[in-house]
Image (cartoon, rainbow, N blue to C red):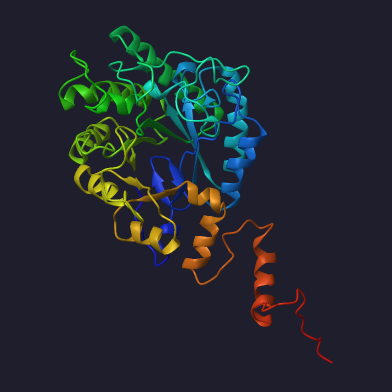
C-alpha cells in the first residue's frame, strides 16, 4: 500500500493496493437501485454509475450484485449468477475505466432479507398479493431460519451441503466479475445480509461448527472470502464490507469485528469497508456526522489493515480530515454522491484553492473561464435576471 508523500491533500493522493492504483481516496459506495430485470443492467446503470467517473471519484463500486437468483434483495437487483449478465456490467466497467475511475463490484447474498419489495413499493417481503406483474416471491435462506423482523416469514435454514453451493455461487460470480473487467471485488458481509447473519449472534443460532462461538460464526464468511480470494487474481485487490456493530448493542461488537478483520487479513483481503447495522431494531449507538469513522479507525489500528470509512461524510474538509489523521485510507459516500455526482471534483477544488484541473477536459477549461468572468462581475444580486457590464469604450 502506498503512503502519502507530497504536500497535496491526502484525499487527493493516489493509493495503490496490489497492482491497482486509485487516483484518489474518494469512493462511491454501493447503492442499490432496484432497477433491473433478471439481474441484467442496461442504460440506467451506465448513466447512473458513469456520472461518478466524470465526477472525479477514484473508485466506483457497483451495487450489491446477487451471486444467485435467491440471493437478491429484491426482484430488481443486479446479478452475476448467469453469463448473460456479464455484457451489461462489462459496458459499465469499461466506461468507468475509460474516464479515470477504477471499476469495482460488490458481490452479495441477501440471505434472510431476500425476496423483499423495492423500497418505493412498500416495506417487507414480496408476496403473491403485493408482487408486481412478472415478479414472483421466493423462499429466503439464512443460517438458522430466524425471521428478519416482525411479519417476515421464517427463511430456510441452510444445511451444511447447501453452504457449499452458496460458496461456489460467490466464486462463480467473482469469475464473471473478472470477465466483465472489474479491478476490485468486494464481498458483502454487512447490513444484515447472509454473511452478516452468520457473524451475528442475533441471527446465527446454529449448533454445528458454523454457530455458537465467534470462531464458529466467522467460519462460513471466512470460507467464502478464502474461496473468492483463490480465484480473484493476485494482482487485484479484494475488499470485504463489514457491519462493525449490529444495530442492537447485544449483537456483534466492535471487538468481534476486529477479530474478524484480523482473520480476513491473513486470507489476503486488502481493505475493510467499515459500515454498521442491519440486524436488530433501531440504532443503539451514537449517530451524527462521521459516526462510523471511529469503527474504521479502530479496525485499521488494531487489525493492521487499510480501511474505508463511511457514515454521513458530507464535506471535503471532513473527508480530508478522516484520511489525513489516519482514521481510514479511503472515504466512501453514497447519498452524498447521489445528491452531488461531482462531489469528488468539487472536493478537489475546495482543497486546492479553486482549481478545475481535475474536471474532465470537456468541462474544466470552460468552467475555469466562466469562473474568471464571474469573479470579475461579482455575485448576481437581482432582482432582475439581467446584470451586465458595459464594454470598454
Residue 368 x %, y %: 65, 69
Q: Is residue 24 left or right of residue 92?
A: left
Q: On the image, which quarter does residue 94 sit in? A: top right
Instruction: Name the quarter where the C terminus is drawn.
Output: bottom right
Whether residue 58 is visible to the viewer of this picture, yes or no, is: no
Return the residue nearer the eye: 341 or 356: 341
Q: Is residue 202 above or below residue 55?
A: above
Examine the rendering and report whether any part of residue 226 can be seen. Answer: yes
Left or right: residue 51 versus residue 219 is right
Q: Which residue is at the far top?
A: 161
Residue 120 shown left or right of residue 243 in the figure:
right
- Report the residue that reaches farthest toward the bottom: 393
Say which residue appears at 34% left-offset and 21% top-offset.
Answer: 227
Q: Position of residue 379 (x, y in %)?
A: 64, 78
Find residue 95 and report its horizontal and vertical position in percent: 62, 40
Quadrant for residue 280, please give it: top left
* Residue found at x 40% / y 24%: 113
**Residue furthest out toward the right:** 393
In terms of depth relative to the viewer, which is nearer, 261 or 229? 261
The front one of 90 and 206 is 206
Image coords of residue 219 (percent x, y): 23, 22
Query: What is the count of numbered marks?
Result: 0
Amino acid at each position: 500500500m502506498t503512503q502519502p508523500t507530497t504536500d497535496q491533500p491526502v484525499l487527493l493522493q493516489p493509493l495503490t493496493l496490489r497492482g491497482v492504483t486509485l487516483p484518489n481516496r474518494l469512493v462511491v459506495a454501493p447503492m442499490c437501485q432496484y432497477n433491473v430485470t433478471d439481474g441484467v443492467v442496461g442504460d440506467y446503470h451506465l448513466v447512473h454509475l458513469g456520472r461518478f467517473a466524470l465526477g472525479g471519484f477514484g473508485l466506483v463500486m457497483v451495487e450489491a450484485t446477487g451471486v444467485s437468483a435467491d440471493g437478491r434483495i429484491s426482484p430488481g437487483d443486479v446479478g452475476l449468477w448467469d453469463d448473460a449478465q456479464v455484457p451489461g456490467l462489462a459496458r459499465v466497467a469499461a466506461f468507468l475505466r475509460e474516464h479515470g475511475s477504477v471499476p469495482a463490484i460488490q458481490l452479495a447474498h441477501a440471505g434472510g432479507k431476500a425476496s423483499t419489495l423495492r423500497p418505493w413499493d412498500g416495506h417487507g417481503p414480496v408476496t403473491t398479493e403485493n408482487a408486481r406483474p412478472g415478479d414472483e416471491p421466493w423462499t429466503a435462506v439464512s443460517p438458522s431460519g430466524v425471521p428478519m423482523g416482525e411479519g417476515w416469514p421464517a427463511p430456510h435454514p441452510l444445511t451444511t451441503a447447501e453452504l457449499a453451493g452458496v460458496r461456489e455461487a460467490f466464486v462463480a460470480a467473482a469469475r464473471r466479475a473478472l470477465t466483465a473487467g472489474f479491478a476490485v471485488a468486494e464481498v458483502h458481509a454487512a447490513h444484515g445480509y447472509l454473511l452478516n447473519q452468520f457473524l451475528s449472534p442475533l441471527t446465527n443460532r446454529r449448533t454445528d461448527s458454523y454457530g455458537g462461538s465467534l470462531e464458529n460464526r466467522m467460519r462460513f464468511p471466512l470460507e467464502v472470502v478464502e474461496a473468492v480470494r483463490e480465484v480473484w487474481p493476485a494482482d487485484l485487490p479484494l475488499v470485504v464490507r463489514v457491519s462493525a456493530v449490529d444495530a442492537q448493542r447485544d449483537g456483534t461488537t466492535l471487538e468481534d469485528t476486529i477479530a474478524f478483520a484480523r482473520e480476513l487479513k491473513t486470507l489476503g483481503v486488502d481493505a475493510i469497508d467499515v459500515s454498521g447495522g442491519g440486524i436488530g431494531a433501531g440504532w443503539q449507538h451514537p449517530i451524527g456526522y462521521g459516526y462510523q469513522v471511529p469503527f474504521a479507525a479502530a479496525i485499521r489500528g488494531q487489525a493492521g489493515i487499510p480501511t474505508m470509512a463511511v457514515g454521513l461524510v458530507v464535506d471535503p474538509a471532513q473527508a480530508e480530515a478522516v484520511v489525513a489523521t489516519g482514521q481510514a485510507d479511503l472515504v466512501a459516500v453514497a447519498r452524498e454522491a447521489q445528491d452531488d455526482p461531482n462531489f469528488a471534483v468539487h472536493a478537489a477544488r475546495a482543497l486546492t484553492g479553486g482549481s478545475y484541473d481535475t474536471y474532465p477536459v470537456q468541462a474544466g477549461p470552460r468552467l475555469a473561464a466562466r469562473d474568471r468572468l464571474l469573479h470579475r462581475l461579482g455575485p448576481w444580486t437581482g432582482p432582475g435576471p439581467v446584470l451586465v457590464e458595459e464594454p470598454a469604450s
